[in-house]
Image: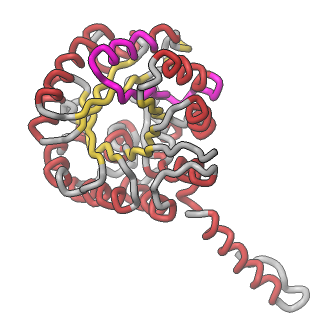
């Protein structure tokens, strides 16, 4: 039986950039460089791109050019779904005015993290999302719901499953069917991811369930596969694994997003179609590293399996052709 396809979403130009403020020595890309990267991602076959976030520029100055980025790409990439993060109703208003065709609303499943991240309670945030959904529907804009801290909270520990399900239920009641569970700090593990994905899809099998994974514990790819086995079909990644946590006592590139190119390799090598060109995705990862001066997804380094094998075979040929006694690597 053929494996079900997945949808990869590139979030470098939003989640990859929003924590640069907290990392010394990192470089902020210009608006033109962000726009160029979005076009590169589309050429690689990435089906969905989170182009920016409509957040307050004092809070996240790296995304202060949200309108300019949207103006440069909306309507210019046919066949590529473009979305933007909106943390509140004001952000939704800005996104609608900018003509973004899809918004991703955000709420956290942890009360403590929710308050630190948005200065709202979970209930206040959900009521705010209801207003954003109403605005979007009236303007013909798609809506997704991203749930931060769906697995482990850096302050409260493991988030109760009941909290996750109650928020999903509220999203369903609003008419949202595109819902992403986020391991915002990268400390989830495969059994926990499988449990939560299965619990959601057992109750609401018509939901298009996605995962937004970070890498702190090194389990992001295992978590992606566990989620896939449980029925998740959408996966966010950031080129070169760039990104970090917010509303936390530490900000570290080791907490970054799972790399887009690593996700593509995982699924394509396992017989799951992504529609993404792996070589181009890896090249985009290297380009993102140059833009920001950090990063390092695994596949970013070697590109593709065929390319890596060819390089080593050439090296082997050089060794084999060397005179006796000189067949040692000089690399």
Q: In the displayed image of the protein, which residue is found farthest to the front?
A: 1
Q: Which residues are magenta?
A: 165-191
Residue 180 visible: yes
Q: Is residue 9 magenta?
A: no
Q: In the displayed image of the protein, which residue is found farthest to the bottom?
A: 323
* Residue at x-position 19% and y-position 57%: 76
The answer to whether residue 160 is left or right of residue 308 is left
* Residue at x-position 35% and y-position 26%: 177
Q: Residue 206: x and y, percent? A: 42, 25
Would you place residue 19 above or below residue 260 in this image?
above
Would you place residue 148 above or below residue 103 in this image?
above
Q: Nearer the viewer, residue 233 or 87?
A: 233
Q: Residue 87: x and y, percent? A: 26, 26
Q: Is residue 187 magenta?
A: yes
Q: Quadrant of the C terminus?
A: bottom right
Q: Residue 159: x and y, percent? A: 51, 13
Task: Give residue 97's quadrant in the image.
Answer: top left
Residue 218 visible: no
Q: Quadrant of the N terminus?
A: top right
């Amino acid at each position: 039986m053929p494996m079900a396809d997945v949808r990869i979403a590139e979030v470098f130009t939003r989640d990859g950039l929003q924590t640069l403020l907290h990392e010394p020595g990192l470089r902020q890309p210009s608006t033109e460089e962000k726009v160029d990267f979005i076009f590169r991602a589309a050429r690689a076959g990435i089906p969905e791109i989170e182009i920016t976030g409509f957040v307050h520029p004092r809070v996240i100055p790296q995304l202060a050019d949200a309108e300019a980025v949207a103006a440069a790409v909306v309507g210019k990439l046919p066949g590529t779904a473009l979305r933007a993060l909106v943390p509140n109703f004001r952000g939704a208003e800005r996104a609608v005015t900018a003509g973004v065709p899809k918004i991703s609303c955000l709420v956290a499943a942890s009360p403590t993290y929710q308050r630190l991240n948005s200065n709202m309670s979970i209930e206040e945030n959900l009521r705010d999302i209801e207003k954003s959904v109403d605005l979007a529907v009236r303007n013909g804009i798609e809506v997704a719901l991203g749930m931060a801290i769906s697995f482990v909270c850096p302050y409260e520990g493991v988030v109760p499953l009941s909290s996750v399900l109650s928020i999903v239920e509220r999203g369903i009641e609003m008419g949202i069917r595109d819902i992403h569970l986020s391991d915002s700090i990268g400390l989830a593990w495969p059994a926990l991811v499988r449990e939560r994905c299965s619990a959601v899809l057992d109750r609401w099998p018509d939901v298009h369930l996605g995962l937004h994974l970070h890498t702190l514990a090194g389990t992001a790819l295992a978590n992606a596969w566990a989620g896939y086995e449980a029925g998740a079909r959408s996966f966010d990644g950031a080129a070169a694994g760039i990104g970090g946590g917010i509303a936390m006592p530490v900000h570290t590139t080791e907490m970054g997003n799972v790399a887009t190119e690593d996700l593509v390799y995982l699924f394509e090598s396992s017989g799951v179609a992504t529609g993404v060109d792996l070589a181009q995705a890896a090249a985009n990862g290297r380009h993102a590293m140059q833009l920001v001066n950090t990063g390092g997804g695994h596949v970013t380094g070697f590109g593709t399996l065929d390319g890596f094998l060819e390089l080593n075979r050439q090296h082997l040929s050089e060794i084999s052709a060397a005179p006796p006694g000189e067949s040692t690597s000089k690399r």
